[in-house]
Image: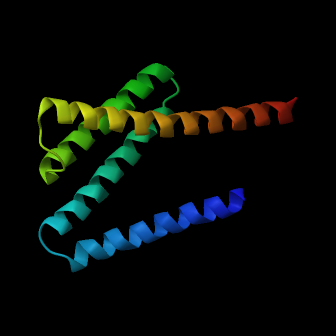
Amino acid sequence: MLKIIKSGIQGICIGSTILVISGIFFTEGSIQMLFLSLVLMSLVIGLLSNIYNYKRIPLLLQVVIHVSGCFSVFLMTAYINKWFPFQFDIVLQASLIFLLIFFSIWTIFYLRAKKEIAAINNHLK
């Protein structure tokens, strides 16, 4: 069952990549801007995750840097693409949704890494 879910997620990722790349070249105007923004936002968020490779930085500071950078990029992208009106209550709602999604994904990655580390440590014993 897990393999089926993993295959489905990979298919979504591949399909989304094809859609975005073809959208950049074969659309015009606001749709093209949306696709370019999506690619740039995803690239920056992916690059920001490299903060976790610096072992001298405490985990809490790494998370603060990562979430701050990702949140800033999200807000800039949302503003440029006019995803929602920049009114306090709407920005607050969007921010809470962003943080919920971010920390849900972060928790999954954290627990997976913790499990892998425990397995490696057990193997070394």
The structure residue drawn at horizontal position 20% and vertical position 34%, both measured from the top left corner, is 91
Q: Position of residue 7 (x, y in %)?
A: 62, 65
Q: Which residue in the rendered view is the most extreme toward the right?
A: 125
The structure residue drawn at horizontal position 11% and vertical position 70%, both measured from the top left corner, is 29
Quarter occupied by residue 37? bottom left
Quarter occupied by residue 109? top right
Q: Is residue 6 above or below residue 91?
A: below
Q: Position of residue 62 (x, y in %)?
A: 43, 26
The structure residue drawn at horizontal position 47% and vertical position 69%, both measured from the top left corner, is 14
Left or right: 54 in relation to 18: right
Camera-side residue: 91 or 53? 91
Q: Position of residue 19 (x, y in %)?
A: 35, 72
User: In the rendered view of the protein, which quadrant contains the N terminus?
Assistant: bottom right
Indicate how the structure is coloured in the image: rainbow
Left or right: 18 in relation to 95: right
Q: How many marks?
A: 0
The structure residue drawn at horizontal position 19% and vertical position 50%, both measured from the top left corner, is 83
Q: Is residue 57 visible?
A: no
User: In the rendered view of the protein, which quadrant contains the C terminus?
Assistant: top right
Left or right: 2 in relation to 33: right
